[in-house]
């Protein structure tokens, strides 16, 4: 029997980006907030300091900052007729754990979606015909527009100290920035990072071919920056270690570096770490969540924490699993297409390329993801899809910086993976490799979804979440097209050797591809097409707010975090200005 | 009072050869904004407090976990040592943990030192 604790104004489950934003905003609104985090606390002075943080074996290879698969994981299969098996070691995607969550080890690519991404189905039908979208493609419009989110995108930029170059300020297009982006209210808080040599070469060639290159928006401060919560960030040192690890210089934005320093001084906030939330306590009649059940992983003792407001801000898989396991909403039934929870799971379709320039020194030992140069000429609404046979797209990025000693040893295909020949080739090519990526969209398909696994269980004995996903014909066609366009640019750069690396027909859980998972608890205009409303409030429990990319109706051709943070601020704003005064459904369907 | 006398007083006060230009404390303070993300005065700071650092023995604060390299550094933070360190931290104290590659411009280092002398 769980020990029942004293009721609190709000409880936040998962202290990553969305949880950090909500905890800060709700305490500013005067609420007492408890933050529950399954992983450990992460304190920069102890956990992110040099030299330990540059231990590539520990962080990049052995995945120190990720969810412990021996405690919790998901099962996976490609198709509904297969038996799913548990993922026993993360590879294709890397959900993070501990305060900061996946935001500790991200590559800090900080994007906005295009205005037309927010009304995707209507946009495609208006432009390409009412019957253009296939029946199996279950994409839908977002219930919020770009213009409504813009002030919150802007605010989130100023939480993170983003470094970049705007391409559209108040409708005025600016060359050198992303001219395909929606109108921004203001320039990025910090100037872009210097381009890597490979990125600069890509920029020159892309520009000569008529494309529109710009420095990738990077969620780290290129110069010292004080954010809107009064927290000071340091300047990025281009150390060369960034993704899969945390920042040694307080420069890369995460809830640990940009929000927790303020929350740690906040008497209205209490952090509880190493607590595993197992279930939301749901009163179906009252359409309320009365609290959460959690197990303290240090003692094994189970507690019930009653709360006025419950914010579910864990990773996509945990959010979806929590609703399914707690009996909130109708589970998606693949056979009939009915039900909402678990529907519209979308991955990100990233396909890379590499090029080797034997006569050029590309200084790969240093750099940051912010040294990448992108073009956005092949995203959703950037180009005409008529006659192409697919929808969607994605940006391209090129870079040569930040190749750490173990993982940063690019060699041409066909090189042995060990031994003398491999050693000679890594030495030969280390200075000369540039890397490219296509950040492809994934448009929802009725066969890609999440539900409860019938066989495998987690450390608390709960059935695991089961993921059924495969690349669709549409997304493969989209990706092949992006790679063919990228190949044209790479060829024109004149490399000694290059390789396009298309994804295999069937999605596999190795090797690493992208941590951008989305969907499962999607937002929409009514309970018939979604799990949460436009303010991320659950249709079936008015005091439950679900945060994160699990609320995206589909995946666009950009990294999700910029939008995820903007949505959290948008929801927090509505809770502060409407919900607290008059608790109840914020949208009447 | 001639310029020679001013220099003489300055030399006597700080015991080091001053730059041939007047250090700009305000500019040093502005540059120091680049340091305080780590060198803040909070208990959780990534870097040691720099309050009163001028004249302090290197690696000597009891509540900060220094690198072995900094613990071994057997000198005081006088202006000359600070100047060498801020130009090239790894050359001065090889293996120290500060993620900063140094000021390319000597004027910047001297201005920061001038500010640190007032930071107590």
Image (cartoon, coloured by chain):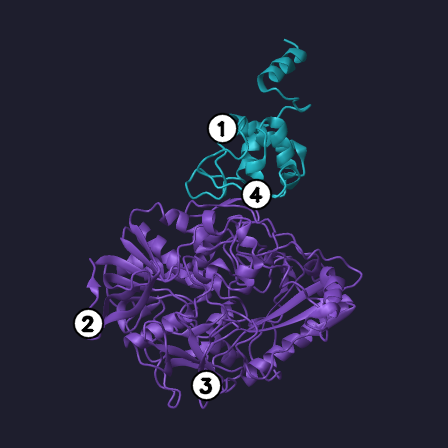
10 Å crowding of disc 2: few (<14), some (14-19), many (20+): few
Q: Chain of mark 4?
A: B
The one of A447 and B55 positioned closer to us in this rendering: B55
User: CA gap, disc 4 to disc 3?
Assistant: 51 Å
Q: Can the viewer see residue A469 in this picture? A: yes
Q: State the residue lying farthest toward the top.
A: B1
The label nearer to you, 3 versus 1, is 1
Residue at the disc numbered 3: A447
Residue at the disc numbered 4: B98
Residue at the disc numbered 1: B52
Secondary element under disc 2, as helix, strand or loop, is loop
The label nearer to you, 2 versus 1, is 1
Secondary element under disc 3, as helix, strand or loop, is loop
Please provide percent x and percent y for residue A519: 43, 74
User: CA gap, disc 4 to disc 1?
Assistant: 19 Å
Give residue A414's quadrant in the image. bottom right
Please provide percent x and percent y for residue B36: 50, 40
10 Å crowding of disc 1: few (<14), some (14-19), many (20+): few
Secondary element under disc 4, as helix, strand or loop, is loop
Residue visible at 62% across and 35% down in the picture: B85
């Amino acid at each position: 029997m769980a020990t029942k604790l004293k009721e609190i104004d709000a409880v936040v489950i998962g202290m990553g980006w969305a949880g950090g934003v909500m905890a800060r905003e709700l305490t500013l609104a005067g609420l007492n907030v408890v933050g529950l985090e399954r992983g450990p606390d992460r304190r920069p002075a102890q956990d992110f300091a040099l030299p330990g943080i540059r231990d590539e074996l520990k962080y990049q290879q052995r995945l120190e900052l990720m969810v412990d698969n021996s405690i919790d994981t998901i099962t996976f299969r490609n198709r509904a007729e297969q038996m799913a098996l548990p993922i026993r070691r993360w590879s294709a995607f890397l959900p993070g754990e501990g305060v900061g969550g996946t935001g500790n080890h991200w590559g800090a690519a900080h994007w906005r979606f295009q205005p037309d991404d927010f009304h995707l189905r209507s946009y495609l039908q208006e432009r390409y015909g009412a019957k253009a979208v296939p029946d199996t493609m279950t994409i839908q419009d977002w219930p919020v527009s770009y213009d409504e989110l813009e002030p919150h995108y802007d605010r989130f930029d100023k939480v993170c100290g983003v470094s970049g170059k705007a391409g559209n300020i108040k409708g005025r297009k600016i060359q050198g920035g992303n001219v395909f982006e929606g109108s921004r209210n203001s320039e990025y808080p910090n100037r872009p990072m210097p381009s890597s040599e490979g990125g600069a070469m890509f920029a020159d060639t892309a520009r000569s071919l008529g494309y529109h290159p710009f420095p990738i928006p990077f969620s780290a401060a290129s110069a010292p920056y004080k954010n809107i919560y009064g927290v000071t960030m340091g300047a990025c040192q281009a150390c060369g270690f960034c993704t899969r690890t945390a920042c040694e210089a307080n420069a890369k934005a995460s809830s640990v570096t940009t929000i927790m320093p303020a929350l740690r001084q906040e008497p209205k906030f209490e952090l509880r770490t190493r607590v595993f939330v197992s279930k939301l306590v749901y009163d179906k009649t009252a359409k309320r969540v009365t609290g959460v059940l959690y197990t303290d992983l240090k003692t094994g003792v189970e507690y019930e924490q009653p709360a006025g407001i419950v914010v579910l801000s864990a990773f996509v898989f945990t959010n979806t699993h929590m609703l399914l396991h707690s009996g909130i909403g109708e589970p998606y039934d693949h056979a009939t297409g009915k039900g909402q929870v678990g529907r519209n799971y979308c991955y990100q379709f990233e396909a890379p390329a590499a090029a080797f320039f034997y006569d050029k020194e590309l200084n790969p030992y240093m750099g940051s993801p912010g040294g990448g140069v992108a073009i956005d000429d092949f995203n959703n609404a950037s180009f005409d899809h008529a006659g192409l046979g697919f929808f969607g797209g994605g940006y391209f990025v090129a870079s040569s910086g930040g190749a750490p000693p173990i993982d940063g040893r690019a060699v041409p295909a066909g090189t042995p993976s060990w031994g003398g020949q491999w050693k000679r080739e890594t030495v030969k090519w280390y200075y000369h490799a540039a890397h490219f990526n296509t950040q492809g969209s994934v448009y929802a398909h009725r066969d890609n979804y999440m539900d409860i696994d019938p066989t495998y269980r987690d450390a608390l004995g709960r059935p695991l979440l089961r993921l059924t996903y495969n690349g669709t014909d549409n997304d493969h066609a989209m990706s092949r097209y992006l790679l063919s366009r990228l190949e044209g640019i790479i060829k024109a750069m004149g490399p000694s050797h290059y390789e396009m690396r298309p994804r295999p027909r069937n999605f596999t859980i190795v090797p690493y591809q992208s941590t951008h998972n989305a969907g499962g608890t999607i937002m929409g205009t009514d309970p018939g097409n979604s799990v949460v409303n436009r303010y991320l409030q659950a249709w079936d429990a008015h005091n439950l707010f679900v945060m994160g990319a699990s609320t995206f109706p589909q995946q666009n051709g950009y990294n999700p975090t910029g939008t995820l943070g903007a949505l959290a601020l948008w929801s927090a704003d509505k809770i502060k200005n409407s919900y607290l005064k008059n608790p109840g459904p914020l949208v009447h369907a | 009072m001639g310029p020679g006398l001013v220099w003489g007083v300055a030399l006597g006060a700080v015991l080091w050869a001053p730059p041939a230009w007047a250090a700009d404390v305000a500019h040093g303070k502005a540059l120091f904004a680049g340091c305080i993300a780590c060198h803040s005065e909070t208990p959780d700071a990534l870097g040691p407090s720099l309050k009163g650092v001028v004249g302090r023995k290197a690696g000597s604060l009891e509540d900060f976990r220094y690198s072995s390299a900094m613990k071994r550094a057997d000198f005081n933070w006088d202006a000359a040592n600070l100047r060498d360190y801020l130009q090239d931290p790894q050359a001065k104290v090889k293996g120290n943990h500060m993620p900063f590659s140094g000021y390319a411009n000597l004027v910047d280092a001297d201005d920061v030192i001038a500010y640190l002398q007032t930071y107590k």
